[in-house]
Image (cartoon, rainbow, N blue to C red):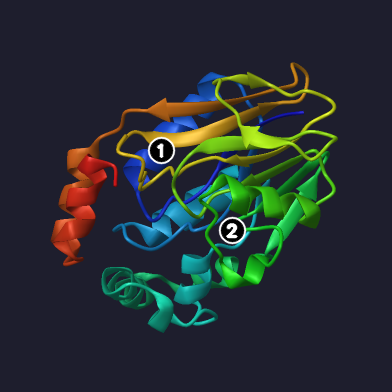
Amino acid sequence: MKAAILSDIHSNLEALQIVIKDIKRRRIKSILCLGDLVGYGANPNECVELTMKEAKIVVAGNHDWAALEKTDISTFNPIAADAIRWTKENINKTRLNQLNRLKFTATVDNLLLVHATPETPEQWKYVFSLEEFKQQFQFFKTQLCFVGHSHIPGAVFQDANGYTDLVGDNPFPLIESRRYIVNVGSVGQPRDFDPRATYAIYDGNKHAVEIVRLNYNIPRAQQKILDAGLPEVLAERLLAGR
């Protein structure tokens, strides 16, 4: 199987369209999405519609759940909470119903798909440090676990002896004796100081994973945010990649 794996679109239609275009150019037929289709950006309806049309599998993210009032936004920072309130006012019932059908996890071939962590998907925990990644390997059985949530792409491996380390190469080969957690980054709001839209390609035939970065029309996405009356900082951060 060869698949494109997306996460954290966050209502950024310009970024999503470029990613979908690139996937089709590469003739990748399977698209898997790790959630957070909405929140922050100005096109929630369009992003849910396009993702549901193109993706084979979609799992829930915390912003999707917040738009459905299934996650308490009192735990969100004030800007994220404002964006959710705006989203709830501007998303239509059809798209909400589509989000409401999403599950926390999915497994396809030898891949686990989850927005946050395999340990407690419903608690939306962040994983940043190597030690935090190391603890997560005991909570899944597949060779690979793909995650999003932090908006920071990267990968960690664990060998048969429990040795855990960062993967330094991109693309990188999948070694049979190792298991992997891969953060695919964010399509719509990267936070590693690289503003380009980000997604991952899993190639089961070549036994490899690649993180892909793409330029898109950031000024247009920014202007939409401003025109919608969303917090100005949400437009500013797109260009900063933070």
Tell me the distance, in whole angstroms, between the alpha carbons under discs 2 and 1: 24 Å
Vertical arrangement, residue 167 with respect to residue 150, above or below: above
Q: Which residue lies under the disc numbered 1?
A: 17
Residue 206's x, y, as percent?
A: 74, 16
Would residue 101 be visible to someone looking at this image? Answer: no
Q: Residue at x 60, y 72 (%)?
A: 123
Residue 116, label in figure: 2
Mark 1 residue crowding within 10 angstroms, few (<14) / some (14–19) / many (20+):
some
Would residue 17 be visible to someone looking at this image? Answer: yes
Q: Residue at x 58, y 20 (%)?
A: 171
Left or right? Give the position of 242 relative to 127.
left
Q: Nearer the viewer, residue 168 or 202?
A: 168
Quadrant in which residue 27 is drawn: top right
Q: Quadrant of the N terminus?
A: top right
Residue 149's x, y, as percent?
A: 50, 55
Vertical arrangement, residue 45 with respect to residue 21, above or below: below
Left or right? Give the position of 232 relative to 91.
left
Element class at badge 1: helix
